[in-house]
Amino acid sequence: MESVTVSRRQSSEGGTLKAKETPMSRVVMLIGALVVVGAANYAMFKSMYNAFGEKNAYFVSQGVNFLYVVYGGILVYPQVFFRADYKPIHPRRKKSSEHVGCHQNHIFKFFIMGSLDCLGTFLTAMGAVYTPGVFQTLLNQTLIPCTMLFSRLILRTRYAAVQIIGAVVIVLGAFVSIAPAVLSEEAHPSKYFRWYACLIYFFSNVPMALSSVYKEMNFRDQQIDVLYLTQWVSVFQLLVGFALAPLQNIPGFGAREQLPDVYTQITTGVSCWLEQTPTCASRSTFALLSGYVAVNFIFNTLGLYLTKCSSAVMRSIAYALLLPITTLTFSLKIMGAYREKITNYTWIGLFLTISGFLIYRAAPVRPGLKKRRSKIKQQASSLDFETTPLSVLEASATTSLNDTHTHTHTHTHT
């Protein structure tokens, strides 16, 4: 059976690298796990917002941010306070004179990243309830052209014609799926559908794409502990989220009627989360919110580990498989009251989106980028989820501007 070659450290003393083979069976198992967990991740995300309803959508967004702070803190703070040799940020080049040992130099960067990610997840939350899950899966992929656009405008990144064609096909796929539902009620995949909710959900790609470009600008020459970065960004997402609360009362955002003050929304949301009302208890709100964050964390970690053990091609295969399987998941009986129908337009849009993704990935690798990927791969091979290059994480869990644009969209905590 064919095997995938990865590089691992031979010893801590010699510091030399030696090739070691990862069995294809393990890679296949990882891909299978990533697809299954990924489908559960998206299904739980949609079910969670439907269970809490539009009145509690803001609480859910903040609740996810809060739980990420809690989960991340359990993993990060013991290292920060009890490990004297813990250096979460350091230059990728040993001869670099830039001092990055203290996080104070990066707090403002973390704040910008957290603010952009927070705005993205806020818009996602505002549109999630009435954007059918089968549409969410396709709209998530439109992050690719959005990131390409801002990368071109800000970083002056050049893309091959094949990549541009792939991005256009992805957008076309999303349009073909959603446009008929806007024009005809018969094409609605679910009773939870409003055309403007889909528009809000789509526009969540704008701040998320800007966040990816900003990360690329500021951390391309540094190695950073994934969990440390995630924790800081999560903290700022939580804090900035309170400042965004008034946006709910803009027509088209949040619920159709005037929403109460933030304190009332939070207390009502907590009551629903703890299932103190029969309606919330019947919808398993505690398990959905708490479980979703855990599943999302595992999903991102599996993507990172797959990058470590295999290659960008294998990762692309996994995410290509995830699209149709996630779409099918929304039509299964296990979705209960949130089950959706898959129309012919959805299948056509799904085919176009997958095709666009594969066309984009088929672009030839530039010589300079090929060398960069090789470096990243070598660094990822000794990955122990500490001091991980940001580009490795983004290539697997969210976005890497010049490598791949795979996107979880469900609270992409870096």
Image (cartoon, rainbow, N blue to C red):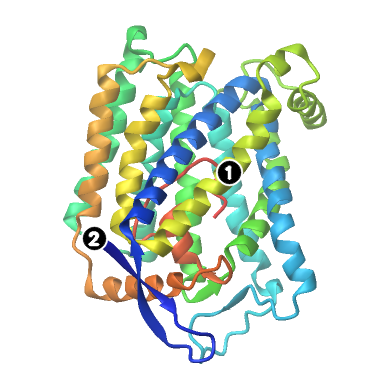
x then y, percent, for residue 152: 33, 59
Note whether residue 7 is visible.
yes
x then y, percent, for residue 246: 69, 33
- Up the image or down, 182 lies above or below 43; here it is above
x then y, percent, for residue 94: 51, 89
Q: Picture quarter containing residue 2?
A: bottom left
Note whether residue 148 is visible.
no
| 44 to the left or right of 79 | left
Disc 2: CA contacts within 10 A as few (<14), some (14-19) or many (>=20) = few
Which residue in the rendered view is the most extreme toward the front? Answer: 1
Say what amino acid the circle numbered 1 marks. Answer: Leu
Q: Residue at x 70, y 62 (%)?
A: 76
Q: Are marks 1 and 2 in contact (CB under 8 Å)?
A: no
Question: Which sits in the foreground, 48 or 352?
Answer: 48
Q: Residue at x 50, y 61 (%)?
A: 214
Residue 2's tag is 2
Q: Residue at x 33, y 18 (%)?
A: 342
x then y, percent, for residue 151: 37, 58
Disc 1: CA contacts within 10 A as few (<14), some (14-19) or many (>=20) = many
Q: Which residue is mark 1?
A: 119
Q: Earlier in the sequence, mark 1 or mark 2?
A: 2
Say what amino acid the circle numbered 2 marks. Answer: Glu
Q: How many numbered circles does the render carry?
A: 2
* Quadrant in which the C terminus is drawn: bottom right
SS under mark 1: helix
SS under mark 2: loop
Q: Picture quarter containing residue 101?
A: bottom right
